[in-house]
Image: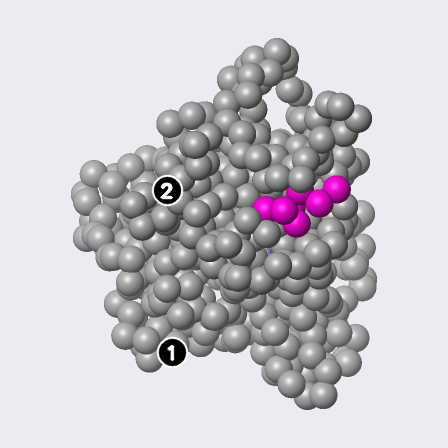
């Protein structure tokens, strides 16, 4: 049922299993949607083996067969109820898995395309990942700062013109060889600055480019339609954000919890501002934009590095229906800016005695003032280049400045939650970030 690998979270699958849908890819390969006894649903690539079938492993060739199907163009409906949309006519061969932390299972085919099997699906009737919709919208608008899409496989019907709708089962996008994600390249850049190997200007260049890319992405997504928040929606934002604050105030323990409780009134007052934002513009957004979603492949010969935005599956902590809803552009701007801050916190904390001696105030390792300076500069340049590119694209009014502060605080509250649920020591990140954010006021 599940892909092999030690690094993924353990998931329980309760039997008996029911086969909901299956698409025969030919030559002993198929893709199935399987429901387990607990109602969970799964995408399962299958391979014929010794008279039976088993879950495909990278190198069996199931992803390669899917790419072959997509190369035949817009498929539309299949008798089994699955739909596909092919956007690239190329056929490639050879498969390998990738060895990184991943929620889903990605397979590289022919060193040219990444097939991502969406392992865990939402319940029937709920929308799945919005990636196909967002990527198609971006591609139609000519947005080039993402891996080129090769196609999508979906459950449910494609509509009349063969566009895939329904839950996303697999996506295929161009593979960027030698790519690093931002948690690697951005921390590396900052460490180079700290070592004195590059200038502040150079260390902030990538943040500046991400500002332009984000603005271009929003200009393309806005072509899908701009709506405006209702008074009711604005109140819901405030109430939901307050609930996140209440949760954090109750749940965060230790010195970090004490500090957070000391800030709670000020955070609450800032979140209150969300309620007055009815009328603010809403567009389709990336929804989970942070440096880790920006792949960068370094170029030789003085050419600019390639930087591409990936992972359009939306915010994994939100229910799937909410991942499809239009949101303020500030959601992406703030989560990216926050992640630049967090890159700084990682370097500040990991590379120094803060790791063991925060309370005693010992701080060796990187020049703390320099790291703080980088955080401020990188964020400022990101935002300035976003604004400039947004203005050039005619969408400057989509970024509502009144959202920046409350959403930024909400983002840090979400980091406490992430720490509690996935990575306990991550609590230092919102703690250090809020210490500085609130000290500035
Ligand atoms: P998941 O939903 O499983 O987290 P992602 O789409 O974020 O999957 O991809 C996981 C990792 O795979 C990325 O962090 C990156 O290292 C690598 N990756 C994803 N897409 C590409 C691509 N187009 N080219 C190169 N590497 C990629
Ligand atoms: Mg990801």
Residue at x 41% of width, y 57% of height: 136
Would you say the magenta stretch is mainly helix, strand or loop?
helix
Which residue is nearer to you in this view: 193 or 136? 136
CA neighbours of label 1 inside 10 A, class few (<14), some (14 to 19), many (20+): some
Residue 7 screen position, x and y as percent: 76, 39
- Report whether 222 appears left or right of 253: left
Magenta-colored span: 60-66
Q: How many marks?
A: 2
The reply to whether residue 383 is in sight is no
Asked which quadrant contains residue 296, the reply is: bottom right
Residue 79 screen position, x and y as percent: 43, 32
Residue on which the image places disc 1: 388
Q: Is residue 263 above or below residue 250?
A: below
Residue on which the image places disc 2: 158
Residue at x 68% of width, y 88% of height: 302
Residue 421 screen position, x and y as percent: 61, 32
Residue at x 52% of width, y 52% of height: 70
Q: Nearer the viewer, mark 1 or mark 2?
A: 2
Which residue is nearer to you in this view: 256 or 84? 84
Query: Would residue 217 be counted in the magenta stretch?
Result: no
Dot 1: element: helix
Residue 82 screen position, x and y as percent: 45, 36
Q: Quarter of the image containing the C terminus? A: bottom left
Dot 2: element: loop
The reply to whether residue 61 is in sight is yes
Residue at x 80% of width, y 47% of height: 356
């Amino acid at each position: 049922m599940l892909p092999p690998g030690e690094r993924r979270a353990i998931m329980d699958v309760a039997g008996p299993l029911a086969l909901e849908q299956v698409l025969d890819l030919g030559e002993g390969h198929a893709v199935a949607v399987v429901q387990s006894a607990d109602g969970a649903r799964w995408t399962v690539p299958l391979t014929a083996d010794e008279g039976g079938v088993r879950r495909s492993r990278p190198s069996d060739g199931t992803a390669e067969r899917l790419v072959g199907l997509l190369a035949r163009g817009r498929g539309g409906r299949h008798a089994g109820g699955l739909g596909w949309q092919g956007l690239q006519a190329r056929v490639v061969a050879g498969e390998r898995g990738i060895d990184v932390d991943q929620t889903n299972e990605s397979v590289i085919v022919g060193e040219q395309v990444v097939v991502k099997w969406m392992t865990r699906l939402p319940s029937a009737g709920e929308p799945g990942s919005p990636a196909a919709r967002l990527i198609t919208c971006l591609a139609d608008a000519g947005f080039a700062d993402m891996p080129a899409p090769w196609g999508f496989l979906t459950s449910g019907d494609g509509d009349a013109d063969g566009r895939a709708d329904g839950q996303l089962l697999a996506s295929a996008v161009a593979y960027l060889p030698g790519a690093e994600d931002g948690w690697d390249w951005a921390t590396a850049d900052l460490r180079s600055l700290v070592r004195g190997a590059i200038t502040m200007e150079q260390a902030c260049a990538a943040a500046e480019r991400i500002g332009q890319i984000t603005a271009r992405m929003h200009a393309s997504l806005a072509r899908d339609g701009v709506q405006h928040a209702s008074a009711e929606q604005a109140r819901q934002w405030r109430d939901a954000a307050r609930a996140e604050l209440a949760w954090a105030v109750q749940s965060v323990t230790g010195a970090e919890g004490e500090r957070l409780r000391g800030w709670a009134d000020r955070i609450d007052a800032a979140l209150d501002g969300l309620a007055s934002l009815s009328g603010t513009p809403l567009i389709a957004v990336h929804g989970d934009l942070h440096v880790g979603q920006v792949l960068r492949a370094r170029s030789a010969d003085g050419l600019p590095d390639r930087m591409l935005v990936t992972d359009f599956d939306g915010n994994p902590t939100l229910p799937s229906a909410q991942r499809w809803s239009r949101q303020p552009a500030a959601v992406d701007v703030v989560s990216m800016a926050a992640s630049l801050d967090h890159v700084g916190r990682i370097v500040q904390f990991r590379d120094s005695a803060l790791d063991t001696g925060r309370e005693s105030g010992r701080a060796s390792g990187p020049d703390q003032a320099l790291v703080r300076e980088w955080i401020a500069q990188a964020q400022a340049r990101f935002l300035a280049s976003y604004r400039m590119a947004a203005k050039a694209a005619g969408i400057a009014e989509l970024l509502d400045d009144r959202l920046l502060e409350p959403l930024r605080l909400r983002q840090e509250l979400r980091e406490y939650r992430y720490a509690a649920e996935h990575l306990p020591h991550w609590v230092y990140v919102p703690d250090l970030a809020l210490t500085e954010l609130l000290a500035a006021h």
